[in-house]
Image: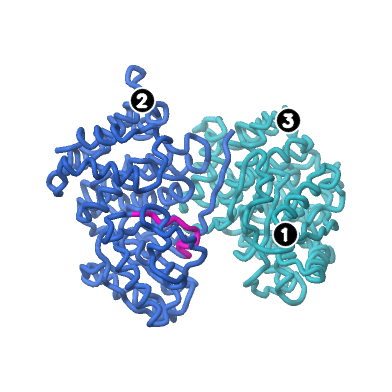
Chain colours: A cyan, B blue
């Protein structure tokens, strides 16, 4: 008998051209800390100035923090919070992709809580203090990947320890997320595909770990997987196709965010996150793609029915002689169609001698019960070895 | 190109046996006004005492207001709010079906706003004042119909004017809704079926008025319509079938609530609501069933594709020679299977000479733009005449 636990309190404003709503929507404060990446991309694209003008129209002040790098760090979060407090900001606005938005979320925590961010990390060297409150967060997404717009997570790397950890707390659900797929039309091909796979895996992993228990997870995950399978090849072929951007963004920024808000992803994501923590130059989606084929071949034995269902959603019929393989085949097919099959991790500076450390940090450092996924350290090592190229 | 505007902030705790969570869930206050109907049913079934004991376990005080009648009235809402204030309650808990929960929502408004409830009614003789805040609301559902557990509506009748009006405001989204289908197993057959159709029509009407614009509406509506079509005949046949209760409750209390949170129902619901206002003894679901066949025959000409899609969700294939008729046929089939086909409104005291008043109050009194639905007063009169038996 299924059950449903759900809590998705973010107000979502989604659609082409909807950035303009930022001028009229009821905002949760009077002065925003606008968080953007250090590469100046939002400025170059003109989006940062549009956002500042729209905030002004809405009668809201703003200060820009532009010190965020990919795989955002504890240090930049603390810096952002300090600037917010010094300037009297009462909410944050994450503008960009996961790095900007996750910094905005973590900074919102440190704007109203004492000490250091890592005092509140739940695992590894973290202090495990409870986060009860945060300043309100608004997001304006320019990518279609993480789902952080609609979920209660942020992922931050501790540059001193190499740990890359989730902070999962209801207080950081964004109050309002404005998702305008027109802002995604100029995303480069590689990022588009990496993030598309990230969105796919969020939904598919949640579908697997849900095991049909929470029916809303199945509802969101199924629509997300079907949508990504249909539209990722289209947007990979032509990034200017707005209909494809709208569909990918709906899947990534709403549905896959919701699935993560309701249930955990699997060890596939945790391994990828560890790789990102140890090798900060690796895009999160790329690290997921590295190991996907080998990972799901390994999982076939434990979750064949669910994997066959995922394969069917992606258009590959189950083969009774190879239970679970439909999903592996569907993934390989999608990776080939989008030009990311056998993505070489060697080119990102990862060497076979790093595998043991990746496995140890993944299993020992995160406090996750890997027994639940029925994968051992040996299994994870096998997956990394088989994925290497 | 679709868009998505969504805001469904209620924390939902759903599943058989989940009432017990009331002892441990973080409640939004220290003292509850528990709202139940005047017939003493919750007391007789032992549910009221269970709820009070669970609240006590949770360290929360409670005062019971048991003056609620079906189609709850302005007067009882004002009485409930007065009792809450006199007793220092800081939130309300609606225990039961739509009447109890809607009273809890409206009383929560009047606990923290001055004047009379009708000062805030948006139409007819209402004062049209804005509702910005309300006390928090918790719900414990014992029926599967209205969707009020997860939507921002309450419906209250003004006993002096005969108006039955919606109050639609974000402040009355429940903070927490506990939905335990085990509490629904003893619902009588007629109520079960009436409410099942109410849930079906919430989803189906929202599907029609959405016109594929907001994709989440389609997602929720489709799952709700398919679930009701499959499980309403089962629960009609055997009310003790818990799996059927779980499915019906999921459709009614979550999915159909969400569709209403995101978009309006159609004039089908407004006519039914008018009948309920003028004839308070008529169950809401019954008034929907009265006119359903004639209403959708009339709408066929305007919305044939959407009606055929709804028919297909219910297992009836479209007939190109009769566009839109698949839904009419599916409804008639479901009404026959559940024993409510040609439900005689004459037996509820409604006479043909009342029709003009029903139409006038529906069209003139609600301020709804009926042009949008392409139905005239003549059309509504025809529908009532054809439905009469």
Left or right of A11 on screen, residue B159: left
Left or right of A258 on screen, residue B355: left
Mark number displayed over residue A60: 1
Left or right of A209 on screen, residue B361: left
Tag 3, which chain?
Answer: A
Tag 2, which chain?
Answer: B
Residue at 73 percent of width and 35 percent of height:
A185
3D distance between C-alphas at marks 3 and 1: 32 Å
Q: Say if labels 3 and 1 share a chain.
A: yes
Mark number displayed over residue A240: 3
A250 vs A349, nearest the viewer: A250
Left or right of B68 on screen, residue B256: right
Residue at 76 percent of width and 76 percent of height:
A115
The spot of residue B383 in percent (x, y) is 25, 34
3D distance between C-alphas at marks 2 and 1: 48 Å
Mark 2 residue crowding within 10 angstroms, few (<14) / some (14–19) / many (20+):
some
Q: Which residue is mark 2?
A: B301
B333 vs A181, nearest the viewer: A181
Q: Secondary structure at mark 1?
A: loop
Nearer the viewer's eye, disc 2 or disc 1?
1
The spot of residue A68 in percent (x, y) is 82, 56
3D distance between C-alphas at marks 3 and 2: 38 Å
The spot of residue A13 in percent (x, y) is 61, 48
């Amino acid at each position: 008998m299924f059950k449903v636990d759900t809590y998705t309190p973010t107000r979502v404003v989604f659609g082409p051209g909807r950035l303009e709503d930022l001028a009229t929507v009821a905002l949760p404060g009077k002065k925003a800390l606008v968080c953007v990446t250090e590469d100046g991309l939002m400025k170059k694209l003109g989006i940062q100035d549009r956002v500042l003008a729209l905030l002004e129209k809405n009668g809201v002040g703003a200060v820009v923090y532009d010190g965020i790098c990919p795989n955002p760090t504890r240090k930049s979060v603390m810096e952002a919070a300090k600037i917010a407090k010094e300037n009297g900001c009462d909410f944050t606005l994450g503008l960009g992709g996961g790095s900007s938005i996750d910094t905005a979320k973590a900074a919102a925590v440190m704007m109203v809580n004492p000490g250091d961010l890592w005092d509140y990390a739940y695992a590894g060297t973290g202090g495990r203090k409870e986060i009860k409150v945060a300043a309100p967060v608004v997001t304006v997404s320019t990518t279609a990947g993480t789902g952080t717009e609609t979920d209660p997570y942020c992922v931050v790397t501790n540059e001193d320890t190499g740990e890359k950890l989730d902070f999962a707390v209801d207080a950081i659900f964004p109050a309002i997320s404005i998702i305008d797929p027109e802002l995604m039309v100029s995303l480069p091909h590689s990022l588009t595909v990496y993030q598309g796979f990230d969105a796919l895996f969020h939904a598919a992993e949640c579908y697997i770990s849900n095991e049909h228990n929470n029916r809303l997870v199945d509802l969101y995950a199924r629509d997300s997987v079907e949508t990504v399978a249909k539209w990722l090849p289209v947007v990979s072929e032509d990034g200017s196709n707005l209909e494809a951007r709208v569909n990918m963004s709906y899947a990534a920024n709403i549905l896959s965010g919701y699935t993560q808000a309701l249930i955990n992803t699997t060890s596939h994501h945790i391994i990828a996150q560890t790789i990102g923590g140890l090798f900060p130059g690796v895009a999160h989606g790329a690290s997921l793609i590295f190991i996907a084929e080998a990972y799901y071949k390994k999982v076939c034995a434990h979750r064949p029915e669910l994997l066959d269902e995922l394969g069917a959603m992606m258009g590959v019929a189950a083969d009774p002689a190879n239970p679970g393989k439909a999903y592996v085949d569907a993934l390989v097919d999608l990776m080939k169609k989008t030009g990311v099959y056998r993505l070489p991790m060697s080119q990102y500076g990862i060497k076979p001698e790093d595998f043991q450390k990746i496995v140890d940090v993944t299993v020992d450092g995160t406090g996750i019960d890997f027994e639940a996924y029925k994968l051992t350290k040996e299994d994870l090592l096998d997956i990394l070895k088989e994925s290497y190229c």
